[in-house]
Image (spheres, rainbow, N blue to C red):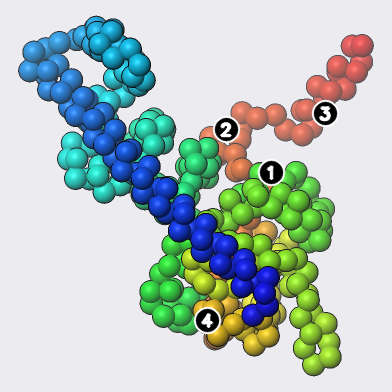
Amino acid sequence: MNEDHLYSELLEELKNTMRHARLQAVVTVNVHMIKMYWDIGKSILARQKNEGWGAKVIDNLSKDLRSEFPDMKGISTRNLKYMRKFAAEYQDFVIVQRSVAQLSWGHNIVLMDKMKDHDLRIWYAQKVVEHGWTRDVMVHQIEAQAHKIFGALPNNFPAILPLEQSEAVMRLLKDEHVFDFIAQNDTKLERELEDDLVQNMTKFLLELGRGFAFVGRQYHLEVGGQDFYIDLLFYHFKLKCFVVLELKIDEFKPEYAGKLNFYLSVVDDLVKQTEDKPTIGLLLCKTKNDTVVEYALRDVHKPMGIASYQLTKQIPDELKDSLPTLQELKQVANKKKSDR
């Protein structure tokens, strides 16, 4: 292993150690605050139920509490209502302590506003803790319906990797990626897509998930005197393995799996170190047929998954009919020109 890789690995290890220590301190303080909010909400709920008090009592409570604790934030009328809702949504604090208590209050407010399903709310809370999503990233994942695409990635991991590693990989990788930070272009070439992703590497890494470190693009491999180039090479510090990522701007074809399998074999022999786990392949295609993917991966002996991507978010079906067509937009534009 070269010195740069060793140094990068040590640096990432130390960063993770420090982040974990700082996070634990923040989580401890946060849990106490969330517990206080839950207690306040529970008390308001109980009194309103037993005494028949209306919403006006929350206005009075906010005013009196701010008078008593002028330096304390978070006791506005709006926030007290959220505390009441919080206690109503999570009636057992054991559930709170296991999941949402580790999130910021801002995360919790968004989850209550956007997710009506209790189990899904817990799922997103756990993903926030696992991946370290900011509130904005969490909103993006909710809007992309991440619960439908995490763990749904067509792959051969269970047949190739040990159970624990296979489950860890499937929890981290998604079935579909949304690169809405890249301009839509139906004629975009693979190299152009690769350029766009590299130029937006921070956003690209956020979309891929936590733990990815970018190693290089068009990563050179020499095999039998011939030159080969991997589109994008990453190292995943949590999985402790290299990840070969190949881009395709068209629909998945079985031969793509064969080429990726070749790259994984070469990386395992020429790049992977003894302490690294088997290299994983991720093929990103414009579209894919999961049945074709299943057959293509059946007898492949290197671990890989096949995901799709889109450059813009899908428009809900119920809104499509209400949006103007391209022809209608052109007519409007021409009319504006003629009116000038």
Q: Nearer the viewer, mark 4 or mark 2?
A: 4
Q: Residue at x 49, y 66 (%)?
A: 238
Which mark sits nearer the N-terminus, 4 or 2?
4
Query: Which numbered tag is attached to residue 181?
Result: 1
Type of amino acid under label 2:
Leu
Residue 280: give x, y in percent of width and height. Answer: 57, 74
Type of amino acid under label 4:
Glu
Of helix, strand and loop, which one carries label 4? loop
Residue receiving disc 4:
275
Of helix, strand and loop, which one carries label 1? loop
Q: Residue at x 57, y 62 (%)?
A: 11
Type of amino acid under label 1:
Phe
Q: CA distance from mark 2 to mark 1?
A: 22 Å
In the displayed structure image, the side of residue 278 where residue 116 appears, left or right: left
In the displayed structure image, the side of residue 153 where residue 92 appears, left or right: left
Badge 3 vs badge 2, beta-carbon distance below 8 Å = no
Residue 216: give x, y in percent of width and height. Answer: 73, 66
Q: Is residue 89 above or below residue 231?
A: above
Q: CA distance from mark 4 to mark 2?
A: 51 Å
Which mark sits nearer the N-terminus, 4 or 3?
4
Q: Nearer the viewer, mark 1 or mark 4?
A: 4
Q: Nearer the viewer, mark 1 or mark 3?
A: 1
Query: Which numbered tag is attached to residue 319?
Result: 2
Q: Locate the C terminus by quadrant.
A: top right
Q: CA distance from mark 1 to mark 3?
A: 25 Å
Give the class, few, some or many, for how many residues have Cα within 10 Å of label 3's Cα (few <14, many ≥20): few
Residue receiving disc 3:
330
Q: CA distance from mark 4 to mark 3?
A: 59 Å
In this view, the residue in front, 2 or 108, is 2
Q: Is residue 325 above or below residue 312?
A: above
